[in-house]
Amino acid sequence: MSIVYTLIILCVLVLVHEFGHFAVAKKTGVLVEEFAIGMGPQLLGWQKGETEYSLRLLPIGGYVKMVGEDGESDNPRAFCNKTVWERMAITFAGPLMNMLVAIIFFLVAFMYFGTPASNGLIGTVGENTAAEAAGIVPGDVIVSLNDTRIDNWDDLSAFMAGVQPGDELTVGYLRGGEEFSASAVASANEEGRAVLGVTQGIAKADVIGSLKLGFAMTVEFTVLILQSLWQMVAGTVPVEVAGPVGMVSMVGEYANVGLMYLFMFAGMLSVNLGVMNLLPIPALDGGRLFFQIIEAVRGKAIDPDKEATIHLVGFVLLMLLMLTVTFMDIEKLMQ
């Protein structure tokens, strides 16, 4: 199932990425010869209008083959004969789609599966714990502990950090809109720390709330990825990357926890794909955008053959990197 989930997520992410390029290319009148999901030998293919649509063997990417993308062409509908702004829009559309789809993944997770509640909502109550003895049940909302106001789970955790097992507590909580109070004696967990014996509740958000949370989460992960990349380049943190094999393992872990976390992980992957593709690396969208920005600034295109060669070298290096990362992932699994 981990492999199935991984393939589904990869296909969705690649599909929306390439569809971004495809849709804007069509909108600007570029002749698209092929829309492919996957790389390598063709498994399925069909012709519709002027474009061939294909599914290929290796689920490691995809592409939109446009006339004049990597060289000169006399065709007025060739990619190279469009304005630099049109070409920039086509190039940027792929990563942009990944960001938009990430928001949708997060929206689904928050709206249908919920998110950790922002207040003191109780999800579960453990047996033979202080909370059970006090009569607290799932769905109650803790609002105070020993007259200390509790607005969220961080407040609750911070208060309990200063409590010792056996300490008496006065728990204020809401149930059905009414406030109640109960006495409890803090119990100890396996590490000997004082606990109430409750877990954080999950709350579902409406469409607008989920959309806002999804946008905020996408921005947050974008910043986090950029910070992590900078730290890896600076050498302050170890370089950590994962290929398809490592991704299967991670997807399996998140799927075992629950669908909410699987959707969250898919959103994180979509953000990661969007950000990584915008890096100014040859063969990636960011590399192409880099050359297009130079062209817009200087008012003259760089030699198409030289640019194509640079992207080809970049592509070969990226494939070698992927093979290396895959080998490392397999090595980790065998340890």
Image: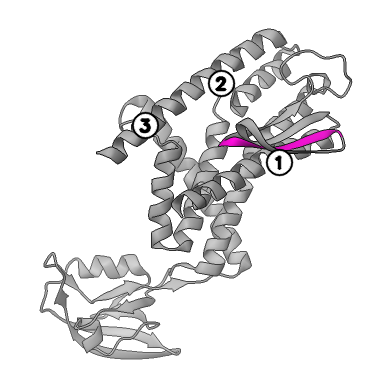
Q: Is residue 47 left or right of residue 329?
A: right
Q: Is mark 1 on a helix, strand or loop?
A: helix
Kindly indicate the quadrant of the structure image that contains residue 148.
bottom left
Whole-angstrom CA distance, mark 3 to mark 1, is 32 Å
Q: Does residue 302 appear in the picture of this structure?
A: no
Label 2: how many residues lie within 10 Å, few (<14), some (14-19) or many (20+)?
A: some
Q: What element carries label 3?
A: helix
Whole-angstrom CA distance, mark 2 to mark 1, is 21 Å
Residue 231 image label: 3
Q: Do the residues labelled 3 and 2 touch (CB within 8 Å)?
A: no
Label 1: how many residues lie within 10 Å, few (<14), some (14-19) or many (20+)?
A: many
Q: Specify the amino acid type for callout 2.
A: Phe
Q: Do the residues labelled 3 and 1 touch (CB within 8 Å)?
A: no
Considering only order in the chain, which callout, 1 or 3, is on the residue closer to the N terminus?
1
Q: Does residue 126 appear in the picture of this structure?
A: yes
Q: Tell me the magenta residue range.
A: 50-59
Residue at point 38%, 89% (across, down): 179
For residue 54: magenta? yes
Mark 2 highlights which residue? 315
Residue 19 image label: 1
Q: Position of residue 329 (x, y in %)?
A: 36, 36
Q: Do the residues labelled 2 and 1 touch (CB within 8 Å)?
A: no
Whole-angstrom CA distance, mark 3 to mark 2, is 25 Å
Residue 78 image label: none
Q: Nearer the viewer, residue 51 or 303?
A: 51
Q: Is residue 180 above or below residue 297?
A: below
Residue at point 46%, 55% (across, down): 1
